[in-house]
Image: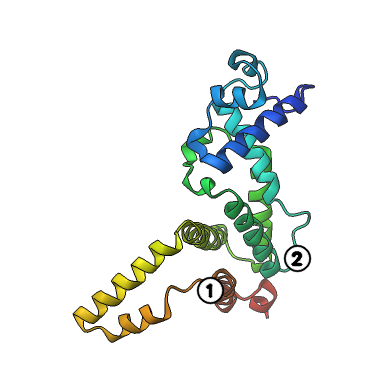
């Protein structure tokens, strides 16, 4: 197990902060022990006296990110609980878009905060009274919505205005050439930047409620 309770915590925290800052600015691929050593102003070998290697650095960073997702208290109502978890998770992903490109193989050991996040998620679906497999399917559906819309929003934010206009014009030209009036009309409206997450989450939760209701409803 990695040691998170030593008197070196303050320095280790600075190292993790530097790693997260670098990932936020340049992407996860920019994070290396050599680069982090430079960022915190110490030699690479000195860095290894505080963090054993890249695996431990990823572990510590994951624990810090997981802490950002945790709720202070899980609401008793399943809809409120799932909504709170979804919005917190989405906020962290929009703050750190690189998270959505990091594979699970990068995290060799699950940190305490992510274990607590999973526990909070399981607690959120308990009031529905569904079996374990159904509960996990519900959580996967919510996670997929969170990640999918966050990816779309992060991608849209990176598109320059002139590139967007070029796309719209090419769309209009293709619609006119192929005699597709709906495409021409869509191009005249431009790309929609209306946030869909609020509505999509409501629709998803409405569907879950319609299918499973609550434990009390089903007993009635």
- The quarter in which the N terminus is drawn is top right
Relative height, residue 151 to residue 109 (above, below): below
Residue under the point 63% across and 56% down = 91
Residue at the far front: name it. 162
**Front residue of 60 and 209:** 60
Residue under the point 78% across and 57% down = 73
Q: Which of marks 2 and 1 is in front?
A: 1
Relative height, residue 166 to residue 121 (above, below): below
The image shows residue 124 at horizontal and vertical percentages of 67, 61
Task: Tell me: 23 left or right of 191.
Answer: right
The image shows residue 163 at horizontal and vertical percentages of 39, 62
The image shows residue 7 at horizontal and vertical percentages of 80, 22
Residue 43 in view (yes/no): yes
Q: Could you tell me how far apart the alpha carbons at marks 2 and 1 are, in whole angstroms?
A: 31 Å
Residue under the point 78% across and 54% down = 72
Task: Tell me: 160 left or right of 200.
Answer: left
Residue at the far left: name it. 178
Relative height, residue 220 to residue 30 (above, below): below
The image shows residue 54 at horizontal and vertical percentages of 55, 26
Disc ID at residue 177: none
Residue 110 in view (yes/no): no
- Dot 2: few (<14), some (14–19), or many (≥20) neighbours within 10 Å? few
User: Which element carries disc 2, helix, strand or loop?
Assistant: loop
**Front residue of 80 and 9:** 9
Residue under the point 67% across and 76% down = 219
Disc ID at residue 76: 2
Instruction: Count the marks.
Output: 2
- The quarter in which the C terminus is drawn is bottom right
User: Which element carries disc 1, helix, strand or loop?
Assistant: loop
Residue receiving disc 1: 194
Place residue 142 in its image quadrant.
Answer: bottom right
């Amino acid at each position: 197990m990695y040691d998170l309770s030593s008197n070196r915590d303050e320095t280790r925290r600075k190292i993790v902060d530097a790693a997260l800052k670098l990932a936020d600015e340049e992407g996860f691929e920019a994070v290396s022990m050599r680069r982090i050593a430079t960022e915190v102003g110490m030699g690479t070998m000195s860095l290894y006296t505080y963090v054993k290697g890249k695996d431990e650095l990823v572990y510590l960073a994951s624990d810090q990110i997981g802490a950002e997702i945790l709720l202070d208290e899980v609401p008793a109502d399943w809809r409120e609980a799932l909504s709170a978890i979804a919005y917190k998770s989405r906020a962290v992903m929009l703050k750190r878009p690189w998270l959505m490109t990091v594979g699970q193989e990068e995290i060799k050991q699950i940190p305490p905060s992510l274990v607590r996040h999973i526990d909070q998620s399981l607690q959120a679906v308990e009031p529905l009274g569904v079996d374990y497999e159904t509960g996990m399917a519900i959580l996967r559906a919510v996670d997929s919505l969170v990640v999918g819309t966050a990816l779309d929003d992060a991608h849209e934010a990176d598109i320059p205005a002139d590139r967007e206009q070029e796309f719209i014009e090419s769309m209009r030209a293709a619609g006119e050439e192929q005699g597709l009036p709906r495409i021409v009309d869509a191009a005249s409206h431009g790309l929609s930047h209306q946030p869909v997450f609020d509505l999509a989450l409501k629709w998803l939760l409405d569907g879950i409620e319609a299918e499973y209701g609550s434990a009390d409803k089903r007993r009635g």
